[in-house]
Image (spheres, helix red, strand yellow):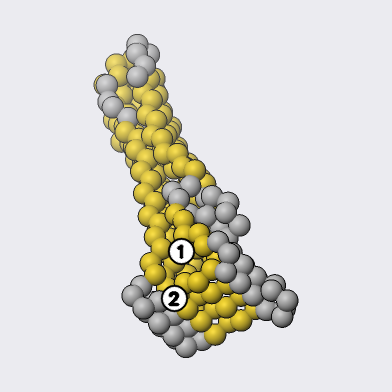
Amino acid sequence: GGFLNGSAGRADATMIADTRVELGRGAQVDASDGQGGGDIVVNVRNDIVAYQYAKLDTGGAVDIARVESHITSSNIGRVIFEGGARASAGGDLRVGVRTDADIEARGNSRTHGGAGFAQGRATAYLTTDHLIQVSGDATLESGGNLHLLTGYDASGGRGNLTAYAHVYVWNKTALPIQTDPYAHANLVSTNGIDPQANSVVIAGVDGNLRTSQGSYSARGEGRGKDLYREV
């Protein structure tokens, strides 16, 4: 409070998840019951839930207020079969790399008094990078089905990705100065399967190499209001 008042609030959050399974050079994994069974299942999964809220409520004869809320989530998932590695299943061999992420940034700026200038910004950035790599001279083989899946888990369930940014500016002064609230959500999903030269991938029944962006949603919403108008 006071005759001339300037206030600001800011919240920042950054999360980095890097989840990997690696079968080293020359390593060997076998699963067999001697009767055509024995599965190998590899799951790599990131699971992120993050909400952030920044709020500023000020007043004075002449009031200047600014609030910002920013959240970033970077998610890496890898399954690497290095050169000379071997994975052999009498039944099915299933590999999946998936991210589930729900992030939200909210900003709320309120001013009251004689004259006011209120600003707000909110951003939510979500990225995923999934890869299954079968290096040269590595071997994957199954007596049953073989599934290499990115954007899915090993059972075929797709990932869910949501990024939401919301900012609300409420200029409750007698002489409000108009501003534009800013909200931006960005989502980038990258999925790959890389059987490199001289690698061997053999399925006894069905072979399935599949990628998916999953179920995704990105939304930015900015609202501004004063005693005379709303946008």
Describe the element under mark 1 as helix, strand or loop: strand
Work out which residue is located at the far top of the displayed protein and give it: 228
| In the depicted structure, whether residue 131 falls above or below residue 21 | above
In the rendered image, is residue 157 in sight? yes
Snapshot quadrant of residue 228: top left
Residue at screen point 37% across, 55% down: 190
Identify the residue under disc 2: 200
Identify the residue under disc 1: 77
User: Where residue 117 appears, x then y in whole percent?
Assistant: 29, 27
Describe the element under mark 2 as helix, strand or loop: strand
Q: Could you say which is closer to the camera, residue 51 or residue 159?
A: 159
In the rendered image, is residue 52 in sight? no
Which amino acid lies under the numbered mark 2 shown in the image of this protein? Val
| In the depicted structure, whether residue 161 falls above or below residue 184 | below
User: Where residue 29 appears, x then y in whole percent?
Assistant: 58, 82
Residue at screen point 50% across, 71% down: 202
